[in-house]
């Protein structure tokens, strides 16, 4: 009869742990809504809403076509210029779903393929394709981009 208590004790101790592990959404399920918010903000040319998913820290790195921008405030300033203080007419689309690669329990690499359509200063339309590779880290504020690289084809 002494052995009979151990299986019961194991169930009492481990069943709550297993049910908690199953109830937490996957990393993809946690980050995908943030990517969707980014896309909505990008198409609204809302710099602050777009960058809400980025680490608001001086260690943030954003690389685009040979240029490296360091720090959140520097990226915010540049993004405002790129979107002409919210007056840009660029429209973004995502022709393929994002890809996720777990780098650790608190870090994930996300690769996105995107397309854009805009009007150039001379009035001509311009279509582009680009890829974004971003490293997301679970911080006290939630999942945030800590490093991002964009490469464009026009």
Image: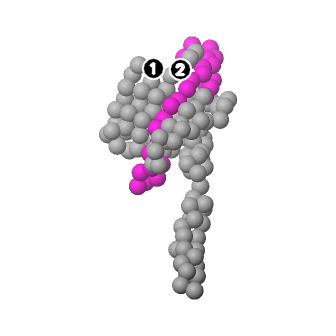
Residue segment shown in magenta: 114-143
Residue 147 x/y as whole percent: 42, 35
Q: Are marks 2 and 1 in contact (CB under 8 Å)?
A: yes
Looking at the image, which is closer to me, 144 or 20?
20
Q: Which mark is residue 65?
A: 1
One can see residue 66 in this view: yes
Looking at the image, which is closer to me, 8 or 114?
8
Residue 127, compared with residue 98, is above or below; it is above
Q: CA distance from mark 2 to mark 1?
A: 7 Å
Q: Which residue is mark 2?
A: 152
Display colour scheme: one colour
Residue 35 x/y as whole percent: 57, 42
For the N terminus, the quadrant is bottom right
Looking at the image, the residue that sits furthest to the bottom is: 1
Q: Secondary structure at mark 1?
A: loop
- Give the total number of marks visible in the rendering: 2
Residue 4, compared with residue 98, is above or below; it is below
Q: Residues within 10 Å of mark 1 (few under 14, many from 20)?
A: few
Residue 86 x/y as whole percent: 52, 34
Considering the whole magenta stretch, tell me its main secondary structure: strand
Counting residues from the start of the chain, the first of labels 2 and 1 encountered is 1
Q: Going 53% across and 30% down the picture, which residue do you hit?
A: 132
Q: Tell me where residue 120 sits by quadrant.
A: top right
Q: Going 60% across and 60% down the picture, which residue do you hit?
A: 22
């Amino acid at each position: 009869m002494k052995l009979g208590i151990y299986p019961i004790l194991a169930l009492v101790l481990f069943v709550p742990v297993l049910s908690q592990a199953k109830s937490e959404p996957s990393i993809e399920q946690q980050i995908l809504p943030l990517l969707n918010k980014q896309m909505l903000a990008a198409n609204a040319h809302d710099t602050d809403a777009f960058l809400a998913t980025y680490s608001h820290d001086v260690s943030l790195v954003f690389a685009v076509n040979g240029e490296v921008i360091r720090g959140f405030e520097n990226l915010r300033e540049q993004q405002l210029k790129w979107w002409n203080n919210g007056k840009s007419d660029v429209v973004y689309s995502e022709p393929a779903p994002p890809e996720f690669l777990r780098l650790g329990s608190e870090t994930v690499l996300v690769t996105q393929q995107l397309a854009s359509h805009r009007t150039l200063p001379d009035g001509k339309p311009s279509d582009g394709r680009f890829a974004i590779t971003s490293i997301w880290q679970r911080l006290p504020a939630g999942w945030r981009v800590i490093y991002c690289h964009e490469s464009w084809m026009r």
